[in-house]
Structure formats: structure tokens, C-alpha cells
Amino acid sequence: MDLIVTSDGVMHAGECTYTCAIGRGGFLRDKREGDGATPVGTFYLKKVYYRPDRLPENLSVPETNLPVQALSSQDGWCDDPTDSAYNQMVTLPFAPSHEKMWRDDGLYDVVIEISHNDDPPIPGAGSAVFIHVAKPGYAPTEGCVALAKPDLLEILKSASTDSQIVIQPPAGSF
């Protein structure tokens, strides 16, 4: 199953449609670190990370055909373009710039890693571009695509390593 994200804040997944948030910088073909934009393109879904203490009571692990890894408070993601671990999971404490994956705000309760800038990572071309849980009111992200947690968990049920996210720019914008 592919996920199609359009500029009107909608994700199409098979026959279903979900509201989603995109980056505060809109869509860009040439994503750069810190621009707040969601990268245009087609990316594979790679892996799911989750907080075991934040899943619904009836769920011990997200239901999916993707690889799954429980997060711990020592997990981070390097966003320092000058570091060799750029755009990769790291163990905290970690001196270079990074994001904490174990967040208090709930945004990374469930996270899908996508294949953006990963083979190999190009310094400065954007890091930590995920599909994750949306803020209240679907406020813009820092460049990710975000969904309500129940919608994200529902999409995961049909996701596999053959699944892709297709991020489409507004018509006539490029």
C-alpha cells in the first residue's frame, strides 16, 4: 500500500483518506536541513519506532509488516550535518546536535522512518524526516508528515517494506 500526500493536508492510503500535517515550509524538491519543508518525492517506509508506554492498552506492539523497534530514553537522531552519524539513530548522551526520540509531547509515540536522504545521507540535505503523530489541530511540522495516532496505527496495519510515501507538490508550483 502506498501513501499519497497532497498539498491540501490529505493522505490517501488505499481507499481511505486521512487528514495530515506537513512542514511549516510547505513542499520543496531541494530539501535542506532546518528549512521546515516536507521533501517532494517518493520514499520507502523503512521501520517503525514506538514508545511502549504510550500505545493503547490493547496493543503491546504496533501491528505492521514493517520492522519495529521500541524506543528508550537513550534514543536520539543526529541532525548535525558535520557528524558522521548524520540522519541516523544515535545513543544519548550524544554531543553533536540531535533530536530526542523519547519525547514528552507525544509526537514520537509512533514514528515511521522513511528513506529520505539515507543512502548515503548527504550532509545538509535534511534529517529526521518521519511520519509521526500530529500536534493538536494538525499544526505544521518541522518537515515531517504527521497524522492522528489512531490513523497512524491504522495505516501501519497495511504497511510493509514495499510501501512508499509519495509526497506531491501543489499543481503548477514547480
Image: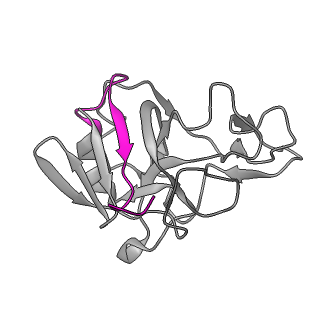
Left/right of residue 52 with respect to residue 98 in the rendered view: left
The outermost residue toward the left is 15
Q: Nearer the viewer, residue 37 or 86?
A: 37
Can you give x and y, in whole percent of width and height, for residue 99 in the image? 69, 52
**Residue 3 x/y as whole percent:** 29, 42
**Which residue is drawn at the image coordinates 57% and 39% (left, top)?**
71
Residue 148 image-quadrant placement = bottom left
Would you say residue 172 sits in the magenta stretch?
yes
Would residue 140 appear left or right of 101 to someone viewing this image? left
Total labels: the figure holds: 0
Give the position of the C terminus as an image quadrant: bottom left
Identify the residue at image location x=83%, y=44%: 93
Is any part of residue 81 visible from this angle? yes
Residue 170 against residue 110 in the figure, above or below: below
Q: Position of residue 145 (x, y in %)?
A: 43, 55
Quarter where residue 35 is shown: bottom right
User: What residue lies at 44% left-to-right and 52% top-to-bottom?
Assistant: 132
User: Which SS does the magenta portion mostly show?
Assistant: loop
First to last magenta residue range: 156-174
The location of residue 7, given as percent across then percent down, is 34, 63
In the image, taking residue 101 as reference, residue 98 lies left or right, namely right
Q: Is residue 169 magenta?
A: yes
Q: 151 left or right of 31?
A: left
Is 87 placed above or below 40 here? above
Q: Using the image, determine if residue 140 lies above or below residue 86.
A: below
